Image: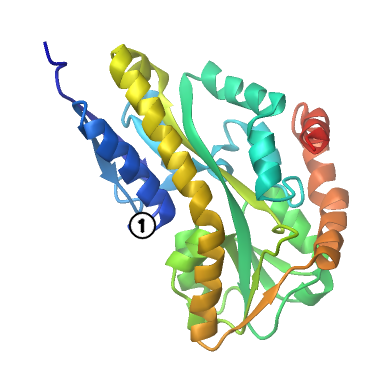
Amino acid sequence: MAAQAETWTASYQFPPGDPRDEAMRIIAGQMARVGLDIKLFPAASLLRPTDQVNALINGSVDMIFIPADYLQDRFPQLGALSLPGVIRGQAHAERVGASTVMRDLRQMLDNADLVVLADSWMPGAYASRGKCVLTPADSKGMKARTIGRFMTEFWSAAGAIPVTATTSDTLPILVGSNLIDIANTSVTTLMTLRMEKSFACLTVPSNDGALWYLYETILVSKKRFRALDEPRRKELLAAAARAHESLNTAMSLTVRRLSGNFLAAGTEVVVLDGENLAAWHRLARRTAWKTFKEQVPGGGDLIDRLQAVE
């Protein structure tokens, strides 16, 4: 006897064409074959990013794809994953993802009745007006977009003027209104915003890594997950594994596409080398890291464990 058809709702902020939207479509396409219809609401068309986790917990939606930055009010420990310099590169991110410290962080989500289906580590990049920003000193006096108190302190210590913008989709408005000089977000979001002609310079990750990485996760309600029959649960996990691999494959390609788009628009593109990264990371240790250790319960131990992952 065939299993009864079922419908889920999935909400996320990433627009069509974004690799993260493609990951969700991989999951939805595979699950449709086993009678689970996942209705996708990309580009925050159903919920704002800041409202998604509460909606998932209260049962208004069944699945979300969300950056950890939007989970920090409820799970402040996740903020460690996006601190500058904590994740040293894409390969290091994968090792961290398989580590005992990530097992414990996922357990924290599990205790809140959330299941991590898949995740990704999105390298950060930033575009700047007027000049390139390679070192902390280069940002002095420039208005930099920030999210959260740790990144605000970090950019402020570099000499920049922090401007809080909790969602990346406001960046074009902030740039167009001359409210920010430095637009920093993930490489994928910066690519989809199509602001190439608004800046003088783009600073992208190098083989040495990015200034920071954004941990982003696909979460489902544990109640809904457990309500699936065993074949569908297995199919959902298999689909999530495909989505994870798709996201990993997209990372290096996205950096190349982003750079190509800015170069085609006549914007200078520069790369953060190891020496410049080291300068930013030294700044992070004495600012954002220090404050995280002081203000987040267990923050010091958490950063130490993350750094111990070779």
Please name the residue shown 77% across and 31% down the image: 302
Above or below 82: residue 110? above
Q: Label 1 is placed on what type of residue? A: Pro
Regarding residue 249, the answer to whether it shows in the image is yes
Please name the residue shown 74% across and 49% down the image: 88
Nearer to us in this view, 12 or 117 = 117
Q: Percent position (x, y) of residue 16?
A: 32, 57
Nearer to us in this view, 22 or 223 = 22
Crowding at label 1, few (<14), some or many (≥20) Cα neighbours within 10 Å? some
Q: Percent position (x, y) of residue 273?
A: 78, 67
Q: Give the residue pinned by disc 1.
A: 15
Please name the residue shown 21% across and 33% down the image: 32
Specify the color scheme.
Answer: rainbow
| Image quarter (top left, top right, bottom left or bottom right) of the N terminus | top left
Query: How many marks on residues?
Result: 1
| Image quarter (top left, top right, bottom left or bottom right) of the C terminus | top right
Please name the residue shown 62% across and 68% down the image: 126
Nearer to us in this view, 234 or 214 = 234
Q: Percent position (x, y) of residue 121?
A: 59, 46
> Horizontally, is 200 left or right of 54 in the view?
right
Regarding residue 55, the answer to whether it shows in the image is no
